[in-house]
Amino acid sequence: MTKKIRTIGVLLLVVLWIGLTGFVWFSPAKESSEAERRPLAQLPELNAETVLSGKFMSKFEGFTQDQFPLRDTFRQLKSLFHYYVLGQKDNNDIYIADGYAAKLEYPLNESGVQSALKRFQTVYDMYLSDSNKIYSAVVPDKSYYLAAQNGYLAMDYEKLFSMVRTGMPWATHVDLTDRLSIEDYYRTDTHWRQENLLGVAEKLTSSMGVTAPKTEDFEKVLLERPFYGVYYGQAALPMEAEDLYVLQSKLLNACKVYRYDTDSYAAVYDMEKVTSKDLYDVFLSGPQSLLRIENPNAKTDRELIIFRDSFGSSLAPLLVQDYAAVTLVDLRYIPSTMLGDKIDFTNKDVLFLYSTTILNTGSALK
């Protein structure tokens, strides 16, 4: 009887192995993972050259891992086991505390911060002068409000803030930490919620000497599609979808956004991005090297240039009241040496607005 049971068990394993192998070989391969927001490995070319060189098998291993049946289900089961059974405090460097998912940002990478400051100094040396009013602000990532309070390792944020103040003596620094709390960020994503940023915008505009946005001027509009942030897929843990709102106003409806990449105009909120993988891309069309918001109803002829990362996409529309134009520059996608041919910096207000995450990996800036 025992031998018969073993034989049946072996046969079931063989059938399962054959079935899984056939699924991987003959099922249409998925091009990307929506949960992980990355392309998936595809079946490598099979010929004598790739087999003899070993390239086929090395790439085939990645292909089978990415195209494994019920891959997302198994990823979630693995994460649940590690997180709740083994008691690990994080999974894939993502942890959940107080209902918020965040990434471990530790330790402080001083060389990364110095690299970012060198890029900013290059911009200052090449394009800026006493004719510019220059400001800087650091956007704290979620761990600033979450990590240490819940027993997780956290970078030395105060030292990072001090490095930025010391490394940019030509800028007026605006502290945003007192205008934010963990509730101002999405639970499943790295970014902050635009509907909670009027206090941040008020502090920045007051420091820059322009009119602050008023709550009564905006309408909070809910996008129909549920929002699953970047940490939802990376953590592979069950989390609920969130609501994503945009703040609309008559002034913003009259503004138009010039896209340097396509030499065309778009709206402040790109509703075509509602179907994109990242719903946050509705804010100024997502990652862009250069954009210019033009405000025909500006109260002054002043212009603002913002050096920013993705956090600036949702904040910039709240800063346009008095500015005839707000130009956004993302140094992750365009070298600072190319800006002189595209932007006139004379007499412009300038704001450096970067998150602690980007500053901590400053080598990503060009």
Image (tube, grey):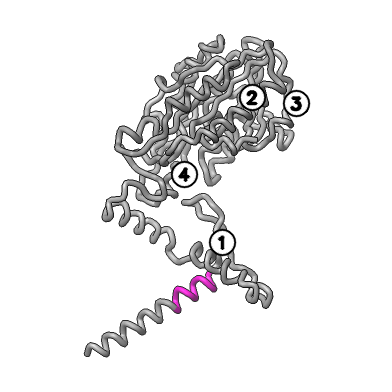
- Lower position in the chain sequence, tag 1 or tag 4: 1
- In this rendering, position of residue 325 left or right of residue 225: right
Residue 205 falls left or right of residue 5: right
Give me the C-alpha separation between circle 1 and circle 3.
40 Å
Q: Which residue is mark 3?
A: 340
Q: Which residues are magenta?
A: 18-27
Q: Nearer the viewer, mark 3 or mark 4?
A: 3
Q: The disc labelled 4 sits on which kind of residue?
A: Val
Specify the quadrant of the image occupied by residue 270.
Answer: top right
The answer to which of marks 3 and 2 sits earlier in the sequence is 2
Mark 1 highlights which residue? 41
Using the image, tell me which numbered label, if any, was put on residue 121: 2
**Tag 3: amino acid:** Gly
Instruction: Tell me the chief SS of the magenta region.
Output: helix
Q: Is residue 278 above or below residue 256?
A: below
Do callouts 1 and 4 mark residues in contact (Cβ within 8 Å)?
no
In the displayed structure, 201 sits above or below 40; it is above
| Residue mark closest to the camera, 1 vs 3 | 3
Query: Mark 3 or 2, which is nearer the eye?
Result: 2
Q: Which mark is residue 230?
A: 4
Q: Residues within 10 Å of mark 3 (few under 14, many from 20)?
A: few
Q: Is residue 149 magenta?
A: no
